Amino acid sequence: MNVVVDLGDRSYDVVLAEGARHQLAELIARRAASARVALIVTTPTIAAQPWFNVASGIDQHVLTVPDGEAAKRLDVLEELLEEVAQFDLSRSDVLVGVGGGALTDVVGFAAATYLRGVALVQIPTTLVGQVDAAIGGKTGVNLRSGKNLVGAFHQPIGVLCDFETIATLPERERLSGLGEVAKCWILEGGFAAELTDVSLHDLVVMSVKLKAAIVGADEREGGRRALLNYGHTLAHALEKVALARDRDELRHGEAVAIGLAFAVRLAAALGRVDDSEVVRHDEVLDFFALQRRIPENFPTSSLLEAMAHDKKAHHDLTFVLAGAEGFETVNDVDPQTVSDVLERFRGER
């Protein structure tokens, strides 16, 4: 099926299907008819997959960047852009990202900045990529100071979500993606009991429809789109601390799951929701078998400092929180309250 991201004359389809990657040539012919060169950017792990047989229908070359968050560095971006330049890519040509969320972030940023913008196609191969990172045009890389602090909005001309690729995911990668799926399910008001007969494909479609609708209404995150950052204030803080030690210590979706469990507890402490909402969150996270406790080696002081530098913050602590009227961005949350909730959250068993 196709889900439209409605942005007027820049609208595009998100294709969700078995074998969707094989629609690349048709997509380029339809949306970038003047293209003569396609640069396929992927990772060594993805390039080694037996299903990596992406064909653009025009002259194409494959470039690689490191796997995972190691790709989201300024030096990697610079090396990628230097490689792109060797092929004399024009503004009529196409960059194609084939990989997970980190890969689509850096390739999207490369497309946004090379020649001040070239056409981009995203082929996300992980759950995180398909339900979140590849859709909506948010691109970027990390700094030591925090996640995604350098980036740009650059919409693709199409996104091809191939269900065949997520069928090959390692278990940890699948669970990581379910962190973002759980976020979408919670935002949509779903309960764990309703998940029993819902397939993974249906959950991906649900998540994509939610993101497409929000992006179409708020492309540049001036209002409603910030809701997609639910759970991400603590998640990005956890990732920042983890990345300083070991890039594989904590995956994005793993951090998001912990962030969701914390955010609802913070909302309860602020009197925005009652304990039934905490129970709903916990039951959804448990259904997906997601870890929802902060690991011991993440000090509260380090997390508070990282959260204060989150890109959503306005020189204060900012969270997306549940409330009586739904979810909203809440600024200037008292640091002592956040610290107290963090400490109580740690003590739960």
Image (cartoon, grey):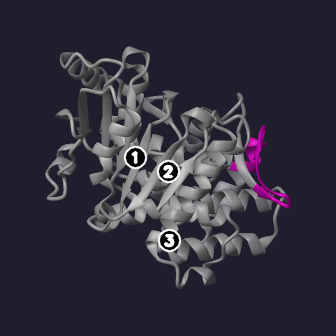
Residue pointed to by mark 1: 101
Mark 2 residue crowding within 10 angstroms, few (<14) / some (14–19) / many (20+) = many
Mark 1 residue crowding within 10 angstroms, few (<14) / some (14–19) / many (20+) = many
Identify which amino acid the numbered label 3 is placed on.
Asp
Q: Residue at x 17, y 56 (%)?
A: 49
The location of residue 63, given as percent across then percent down, is 19, 33
Regarding mark 1 in the picture, which secondary structure is present there? Answer: helix
Above or below residue 288? Residue 229 is above
Q: Residue at x 47, y 77 (%)?
A: 199
- Left or right of residue 224: residue 13: left
The location of residue 99, given as percent across then percent down, is 31, 47
Range shown magenta: 322-338
The location of residue 93, given as percent across then percent down, is 31, 25
Residue 324 lies in magenta, yes or no? yes
Q: Sequence-wise, which precedes: disc 3 or disc 2? A: 2
Q: Nearer the viewer, residue 76 or 85?
A: 85
The location of residue 283, given as percent across then percent down, is 61, 77
Q: Residue at x 32, y 30 (%)?
A: 94
Above or below residue 96? Residue 169 is below
Q: Which mark is residue 132?
A: 2
Regarding mark 2 in the picture, which secondary structure is present there? Answer: helix
Q: Residue at x 32, y 68 (%)?
A: 171
